[in-house]
Image (tube, helix red, strand yellow):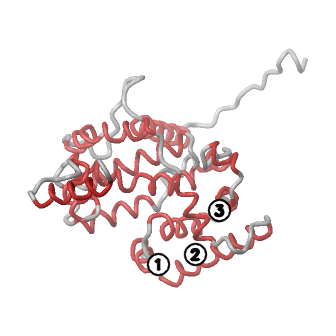
Amino acid sequence: MTAWQRILQLAATYLKGDNPCGVYAQVRSRRFDTDAVLEKIMHHDKEGFASFYERYRGRVYRFIVRQHGTGEYGKAAYYSAWRHLVVAGLTSRTAKDLKLSFYQYLGQPVSSLMTTKRDQRPSNYLPRDIEQDGNWSLVLIDHFKRLNDDKKRYFLFKHEIGISEAAIARTFEVRKQVVESSIKEAESELRVKLEKSGCPKRLSLEKLYRESRVVKPPVSWDGEILRSFNMWLKQADRPNSEGKIESTPVGQGGVGEKWTSLRQQVKTKLSMLKHAKPKVRERKLSSFHR
């Protein structure tokens, strides 16, 4: 069948009222109406969540790992963000409220308890095959991770998530001038560092960042997130569950449950240390020092 015959066949199918592209076309058409999909999430619709996830998975993944890395901390942050979207959908009044809650959650650290460990751990932001190409988008991301936290966050909300400076300011209740200034400083700093690294001036910052957006979450993460939808709803619907952490048997549950359990254990340990009486420990020399 020639290309023209195929086009005529698709046109004829459309005129008969059939869907020439099948179910996939229906999902794609829903995905472009973000508010409609968010409303489906608010009504516990798993297909709506899957559609929203398919559209934003790459953006959210890059937003998180370019700040926290791709290790256990980054994975837990990614998992926690999607769980928040599902749980917040139960109490949000409108799709706009749910979107705002999701952005606000993305814009704050998952936990301050692991900050030191996060900063000391080396990160790998791009796949190995891209690293071997030696393209300038890799150099851009390498310089990006040296920006301060506010510059990273505002830069990513503009260039990755795709919202305006005014929307960012409203989301975090700061002045628009603060956001604009942080983004402008971040972009200027990155351009200067790229030029010093030998990057040709003809390659714009926007072009280089677009090239870096090929990074997507691992398939295993996708499967874990989508399978967790019903579990998150059940957890949120349990009576008196707010503020309580249920123990998860070893080998069960996803990384989100493990991360929540870890945070609770750290908080409990810190609380116990705070109220414990100081003890004098007798220092023992090892055989090496005798």
Residue pointed to by mark 2: 183
Amino acid carrying mark 2 in the image: Ile
Local crowd size for mark 3, using a 10 Å CA cut-off: few (<14), some (14–19), many (≥20): many
In what element is the residue under mark 1? helix
Q: Position of residue 248 (x, y in %)?
A: 36, 28
| Residue shown at the point (55%, 47%) measured from the top left | 113
Q: CA distance from mark 2 to mark 3?
A: 12 Å
Instruction: Left or right? Give the position of 40 relative to 218.
Output: left
Instruction: Return the x and y of residue 290 as percentages of the image width and height.
Output: 90, 17
Q: Which amino acid, mark 3?
A: Phe
**Residue at image coords 25%, 40%:** 235
Of the numbered discs 2 and 1, the one sitting upstream in the chain is: 1
Residue 122 placement: quadrant: top right
* Image point (11%, 61%), residue name: 15
User: Which residue corresponds to mark 3?
Assistant: 144
Q: Is residue 199 left or right of residue 72?
A: right
State yes or no: discs 2 and 1 in contact (Cβ < 8 Å).
yes
Which type of secondary structure does the marked residue at label 2 adopt?
Answer: helix
Q: Residue at x 68, y 69 (%)?
A: 190
Give the image quarter of residue 36: bottom left
Could you give the CA–CA distance between mark 3 and mark 1, rounded to whole angstroms?
A: 19 Å
Report crowding for label 2: few under 14, some 14 to 19, many 20 or more residues within 10 A (C-alpha): many
Quadrant for residue 103, please give it.
bottom left
**Mark 3 residue element:** helix
Q: Nearer the viewer, residue 224 or 84?
A: 224
Q: Is residue 91 left or right of residue 218?
A: left
Which residue is situated farthest in the top direction here?
A: 287
Q: Which residue is mark 1?
A: 165
Q: Observer-nearest residue: 49 or 103?
A: 49
